[in-house]
Amino acid sequence: MQGKQPCLRDQVRTLIRVDHYSIRTEKTYWYWIRYFIRFQNMKHPRDMGPRDVIEFLAWLAVNRNFAAATQKARP
């Protein structure tokens, strides 16, 4: 099966390990990625855009009482 793209988790794992993040950070990132995907009714991230991210962050701030700083855009 040449040319088959690795699954999302393997892609995330590779990027995190290339940047030398800790395993704990990798697990935390993967947790939030899964949470986001489930919030968006199991849509694949490649099928989502900025609006989906904003909706998720707003929901976290309003419904889950997360700090407003989670919604600040980063350069």
Image (cartoon, rainbow, N blue to C red):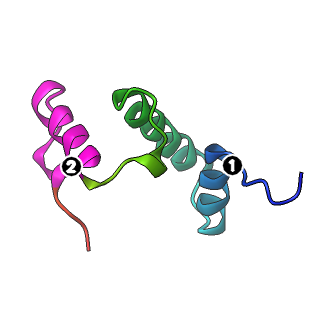
Main SS class of the magenta portion in the image = helix
Q: Which residue is mark 2?
A: 70
The one nearer the camera, 40 or 31, is 40
Above or below, 15 relative to 4: below
x, y (%) of residue 45?
45, 46
Q: Earlier in the sequence, mark 2 or mark 1?
A: 1
x, y (%) of residue 61?
14, 36
Amino acid type, label 2:
Thr
The CA span between labels 2 and 1 is 26 Å
Amino acid type, label 1:
Asp
The one nearer the camera, 46 or 33, is 46
Seen at 35% across and 32% down, the residue is 40
The one nearer the camera, 60 or 52, is 52
Q: Which residue is mark 1?
A: 10
Residue 5 magenta: no
Above or below, 74 relative to 53: below
x, y (%) of residue 50?
27, 55
